[in-house]
Image (cartoon, grey):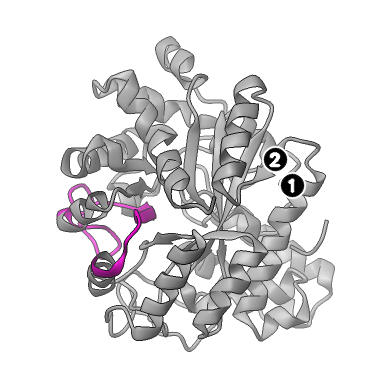
Amino acid sequence: MPSIRKIGVAAAATAISVGAVVGARATGRHLVARAERQRCVTSVPPPYDASARARELHVTLEVVDLHADSLFWGRDLLDRGTQGQVDIPRLLEGNVALQVLAASTKSPRHLNIERNDDTTDDVLFVAIGGGWPPATYRSLLARAVHLADRGVYLEEHGEGRFRLIRSRADLATYRADRAADRGMTAGLLAIEGAHALDDDPANVDVLFEAGYRMMSMSHFFDNAFGGSAHGVDKGGLTDAGRQVIARMERLGMVVDVSHASAATIDDVLAVATRPLLVSHTGVRGTADNARNLSDDHLRGIAATGGVIGIGFWDTATGGSDVASIARAIAYAADVAGVDHVALGSDFDGAVTVPIDATGLVQITDALLELGWDEISVAKAMGANALRVLDEVLPA
């Protein structure tokens, strides 16, 4: 296999000692794997139980999850793993039709959800320890291209079990094929933070060519394109950021406002002409903190025709179990409408989540327990996300 976010990835990167920089490549990869094992925690191990009604419904769904950091760690996702939450076999077992695979290219040290600057770079330790190409030590764009190559590897070596979605035509063909054969899943590549552009809006084209079809303006620090909810200034969209959004919309890339400052979200809402997406977030109605969205922003995203992906970790949901995830989804649906909610797990993002990809049937079950009808459950579990992708992706 070729050499192969957010608070958890940075914390995990910090756990990799500087010794990984100077140590043997095998030692570095061991340290990366150990960090993943320690940080990407599933609080309830499989197998997962669910009601007969939920199991019967779940196998009929097109399940979509809008955020996982699984490419970051360097495991061969074609094989069933014993750590983390996502790989191709577990996606298939969980009936996941499409998994968004995100690339995190820089994270500051001592990460928190209140205030971070851009002066440190813990992803560098992962890059060196994980044996990434030397170009990735200096260029965030090179890191993004490298991680995209890992997604391409899955498609080329997956023996038909995995496809990358790059266009509406890809999506339509894949969905038709999967309707006849559930032994396949798909991925869509996303960028977490436009700092991956190395400060040049023209590099949107480079990322598009590499296969990326989604990008957020910021991650955990302010950058040249927009402010972060966790940055120092927390400013709005810059002129360069407006150029980036225009390029993304012209190419058919989904604009993600996860981690964006309130001012940046307001500015993106003002200039966007296509449905927006929040790949992984929480809602302040169930967990009131700087990481999560206000009711006004939930309504604003919905007004574009977009969707809000609800995360699975406690800062997002306000709890540590699947019932908390369902309550956050239900709250967002009450505010924004049931047509505008989705799943945004943050699997393999170095946060603790209650299930791995094989346990998504438990969310189906929890939504049914809340009294949702089967059509509404199907929308939240994937149909809403597929609608947005079908509208925004290039023809």
List x then y, in percent, for residue 5: 50, 65
Q: Is residue 111 visible?
A: no
Q: Are marks 1 and 2 in contact (CB under 8 Å)?
A: yes
Specify the amino acid type for callout 1: Glu
Q: Nearer the viewer, residue 243 or 138?
A: 243
- Magenta stretch contains residue 278: yes
Q: Nearer the viewer, residue 210 or 39?
A: 210
- Of the 4 image quadrants, the one containing the N terminus is bottom right
What residue is disc 1 on?
155
List x then y, in percent, for residue 148: 67, 62
The residue range painted magenta reads 270-295
Residue drawn 21% across and 47% down?
Answer: 286
> Which mark, residue 162?
2
Outermost bottom residue: 119
- Magenta stretch contains residue 34: no
Name the side, left or right, on which 32 lies relative to 385.
right
